[in-house]
């Protein structure tokens, strides 16, 4: 079982910054990819950013240059630094972790989500 605990969401004014954190705990062999997705009201969940175990990262075009994903593999924690936030960034942000269990099977777990609201 893999548990994910997210933190860092909240209300921020346009142009402001927030930092999200997601810590994974439990019993697993390895975490391969950690990432963030978001879902705005009335829209489908979409990729924000991912970070692989090797250090490679991917970003949605809409957040490139504003958001930075980082990962502390020793702590099984992923961060999302969000700068220059805009109202269109308002959404529930979900942490996602994919890896391999001790039994050899793959897992793909989601956090409960943390609300980010950008408003003046």
Image: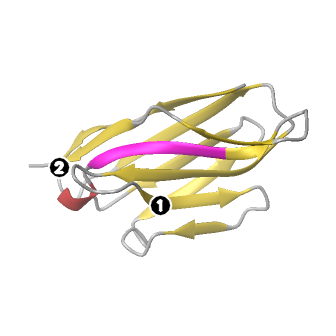
Q: In this view, does 63 lie to the left or right of 106?
A: left
Tell me, yes or no, if residue 74 can be seen here.
yes
Which numbered mark, 1 or 2, is in the foreground of this view? Answer: 1
Tell me, yes or no, if residue 86 can be seen here.
no
Q: Give me the disc on residue 47.
A: 1
Dominant secondary structure (helix, strand or loop) of the stretch shown in magenta = strand
How far from the left and from the top, in percent, is residue 42? 22, 53
For disc 1, the neighbor class at 10 Å (few under 14, some 14 to 19, many from 20) is: some
How far from the left and from the top, in percent, is residue 4? 59, 30
Tell me the residue at 40%/45% (across/down): 93
Tell me the residue at 22%/49% (across/down): 41
Q: Give me the disc on residue 13.
A: 2
Helix, strand or loop status at disc 1: strand
Tell me the residue at 57%/45% (across/down): 96
Tell me the residue at 39%/66% (across/down): 66
How far from the left and from the top, in percent, is residue 102? 90, 33
Q: What stretch is highlighted in magenta?
A: 91-97
In magenta stretch: residue 94: yes
């Amino acid at each position: 079982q893999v548990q994910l605990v997210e933190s860092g969401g909240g209300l921020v004014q346009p142009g402001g910054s927030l930092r999200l954190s997601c810590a994974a705990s439990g019993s697993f062999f390895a975490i391969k990819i950690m990432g963030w997705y978001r879902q705005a009201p009335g829209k489908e969940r979409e990729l924000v950013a991912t970070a692989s175990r090797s250090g490679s990262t991917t970003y949605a075009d809409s957040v490139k240059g504003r958001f930075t994903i980082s990962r502390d593999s020793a702590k099984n924690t992923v961060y999302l630094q969000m700068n220059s936030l805009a109202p269109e960034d308002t959404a529930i942000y979900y942490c996602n972790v994919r890896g391999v269990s001790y039994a050899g099977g793959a897992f793909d777990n989601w956090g409960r989500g943390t609300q980010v609201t950008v408003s003046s």
